[in-house]
Image: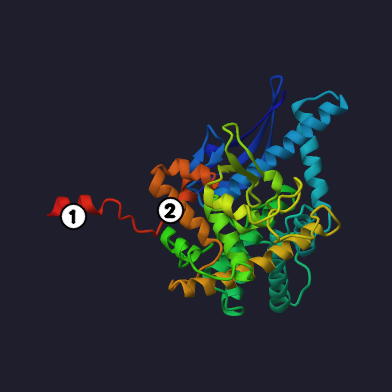
Amino acid sequence: MPAISIIARTRRKDDHGRVPLRMRIAHRGEKRFISIPVKVLLGKWNGDKRRVTGTHPDAGEINAFLSDLERAAFSVISRLERAGTLITAQRIKDEIQEEREEGKSAPEDFLAFAREKVKGYKRRGQIGTFRSYRTTCRKFTAFIEETYGRDEVPFGALEAELFREFRTYCYEERGNSTNTVGRELGVMRTLVRHAMKEGKLSAYPFEHITIDSEPSRKELLTPEEVERIADLEIDEESPAAEARRWFLFAYYAGGMRFSDVATLQWQHIREGRSGRPRVCYKMKKTADTVGVPLIPEAKQILARYDEGNGDDWVFPISEGIDPDSYRGKEALHRRKCQRNSAANRHLKELAGRAGIEKRVTFHLSRNAAAWKLYQNVGDIYKVSKFLGHSNVEQTQDYIDGFVDESRDEDFIAAMS
């Protein structure tokens, strides 16, 4: 099997401590190399993993770009193997470079390229990403038209200075916040990476661009405040009570996101090996599977709804929508946005009635659940699994800001 690896040319270090990368193709004692249009800081290069370390500027984007290059190379190898042709390192190199040249011969307008890539998210059912990226593309297009009087951008014009000007445009002409500007630049960086993957760029323009961000004010809802909302006496047939049931079920089920509550089906409620009823579902945001046992409060909420067939919705949030129909995913995304907004309005009202002076939203049930689990379990790694996080840093972000009073008595005793 041919071997593909990314290596740093350590003897080619420039004045800034950066070295170029290249792809090594090895097969049956033969080696060939392909230059990669990226330079990395030598001190941040992990030769064993063949990736930059997490502290390298734009580490995520660079490593993702390198992974894309490797996947493209292995795709070429698979195609040659299926064709039954004689495989040599030179043949693999030629095929990879030919594909990159074909990509360069495509239309040279980055704006058209970006629009087509954004449509791809819609075709794959990623409606939220599609709408967010489309908004950014429209803003970048407006920037090009207003600044340069053009409706096209050649790939050769995608230099760092262009994106610095776009950053200034977002701040000064659009009045965007720091985090909004950071998000817009992040989208453009992703689209640029797609262009590099297809061989349309010879250099990475974001290598020396800083994407600013600032911590946003995070509202936190304590488990005690959740229970105050749960104890309010309201008409159980009212829309506010319906929104409260969704919110409380999300909390009792370990902090489900609204999108997952909206698309929960009866087939996701089933007995585990222990015989306990569980809710097991695949998270819409990450596609990771999460499963937790149902506590009595969650069962009580489910008892208000008639159990349907396996693929029927549990809650009436998405009723009447078939996600597999024509434009079904787009209709489902639109419905979730509408119902989430409505639920947040009701929760704001209920919080006020409960004497909670916070901007309560549906997502706060997830933070509250994370905090309660952490307080009672005491193991952040276990809590991370309950929430379906890929790393404990995400979990830590959920519980940061809560005041831990569990050791107050120890402190008082020690200081007295």
Indicate which disc, 1 or 2, sits on the residue closer to the N terminus: 2
Residue type, mark 2 in image: Trp
Residue type, mark 1 in image: Ile
Tell me, yes or no, whether the two marked residues, 1 and 2, touch with CB atoms within 8 Å: no
Residue found 87% across the figure and 28% down from its top? 83
Image x and y of residue 285, in percent? 63, 52
Residue found 86% across the figure and 25% down from its top? 85
Q: Residue 117 versus residue 40: which sits nearer the camera?
A: 117
Secondary structure category for the residue under label 1? helix
Q: Residue 138 versus residue 145: which sits nearer the camera?
A: 138
| Residue 272 is at least partly visible in this image | yes
Tag shown at residue 23: none
Q: Is residue 263 above or below residue 377?
A: below
| Residue 254 is at least partly visible in this image | no
Q: Is residue 320 left or right of residue 204?
A: right
Secondary structure category for the residue under label 2? helix
Q: Is residue 152 left or right of residue 264?
A: right
- Which residue carries the number 1 mark? 412
Image x and y of residue 361, in percent? 54, 66
Q: Is residue 26 above or below residue 340?
A: above
Q: CA distance from mark 1 to mark 2?
A: 23 Å
